């Protein structure tokens, strides 16, 4: 299990590859599911130039760790991973990476979906967008999951 | 001993404070703390509240040494 807040850009595929290489190859893993969230250049009909991501240091890490523990127990996962950016983010950069390893596809996929949806609803992060006009605004709420 | 109160994101800008130390001689509800920190602003409808980094409701009690936080709906991910 790994939970980490990243103040600098990261390549999610390299992180996954490195993490896979460190994981114990037990012969029990039959499924890996991951979700990668990326910054778009538009939101609510406007062109977005960049974004600032704020978090509540301490509570965010604590919440994400509790979430990872809950998910590993509920779906009997072999492992899980949650990485999230903070600070200044540019278009096309990764905002979040979550991954779940399990014996079968169903728990891996369900756990991965649950991880990202719970994170988006409860983890204390806030996005402030800078539009191409220079105007800055806080994102009021996340989009629904469906 | 004080209660440390933190405000985040748009709420910090609305109230004009990021962190406040409140003198706490006796336990206070989170709602009472909000009233004091915001100088009697009504509690925003969608505000989220935490006591020692765990989500709580406005009637939770905080005492000296605790950390209380107020913030708007979260938008990570």
Image (spheres, rainbow, N blue to C red):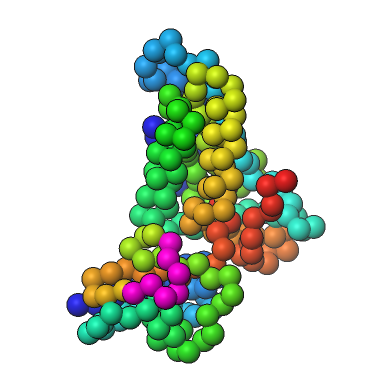
Q: Is residue A92 left or right of residue B16?
A: right
Q: Position of residue B31 (x, y in %)?
A: 43, 80
Residue at horizontal 68 percent and vertical 47 percent from the top: A145
Q: Residue at x 49, y 24 (%)?
A: A101
Task: Report the magenta residues as a range.
Answer: B55-61
Point out residue A25 in the picture as x, y percentages from the top left corner.
40, 13
A142 on left or right of A18:
right
Task: Please tell me which residue lies in front, A61 or B9.
Answer: A61
Picture layout, residue A99 above or below residue B38: above
Q: Locate residue B9, reporting x and y percent.
A: 51, 67
Q: Is residue A43 visible?
A: yes
Whether the magenta-drawn stretch holds residue B28 is answered as no
Q: Nearer the viewer, residue A35 or A13?
A: A35
In which quarter of the view is residue A13 placed? top right
Task: Point out the residue furthest to the top here.
Answer: A27
Q: Is residue B71 above or below residue A30?
A: below
Q: Quadrant of residue A110?
A: top right
Residue at the extreme bottom of the image, as rendered: B40
| In the image, residue A140 above or below residue A83 | below
Apparent side of residue A113 relative to residue A41 in the rendered image (left or right): left
User: Magenta stretch containing residue B58, yes or no?
Assistant: yes
Residue A2 drawn at (x, y percent): 39, 34
Q: Is residue B3 left or right of residue A69?
A: left
Identity of the residue drawn at 45% across and 89% down: B39
Q: Name the residue located 50 percent from the left edge and 67 percent from the top edge.
A: B48
Count the numbered circles shown. Answer: 0
Q: List the single residue furthest toward the right.
A: A45
């Amino acid at each position: 299990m790994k939970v980490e807040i990243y103040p600098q850009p990261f390549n999610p595929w390299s992180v996954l590859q490195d993490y896979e290489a460190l994981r114990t190859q037990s012969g029990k893993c039959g499924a890996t599911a991951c979700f990668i969230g990326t910054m778009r250049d538009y939101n609510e009909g406007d062109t977005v130039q960049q974004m600032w991501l704020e978090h509540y240091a301490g509570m965010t890490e604590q919440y994400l760790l509790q979430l990872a523990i809950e998910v590993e127990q509920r779906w009997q996962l072999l492992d899980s991973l949650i990485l999230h950016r903070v600070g200044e983010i540019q278009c096309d950069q990764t905002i979040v990476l979550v991954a779940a390893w399990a014996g079968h596809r169903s728990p891996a996929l369900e756990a991965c979906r649950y991880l990202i949806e719970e994170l988006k609803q409860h983890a204390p992060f806030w996005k402030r967008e800078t539009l191409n006009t220079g105007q800055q605004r806080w994102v009021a709420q996340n989009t629904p999951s469906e | 001993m004080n209660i440390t109160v933190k405000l985040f994101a748009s709420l910090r800008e609305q109230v004009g404070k990021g962190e406040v130390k409140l003198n706490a001689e006796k336990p206070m509800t989170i709602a009472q703390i909000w009233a004091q920190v915001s100088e009697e602003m009504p509690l925003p409808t969608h505000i989220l509240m935490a006591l020692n980094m765990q989500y709580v409701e406005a009637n939770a009690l905080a005492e000296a040494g605790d950390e209380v936080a107020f913030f708007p709906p979260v938008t990570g991910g």
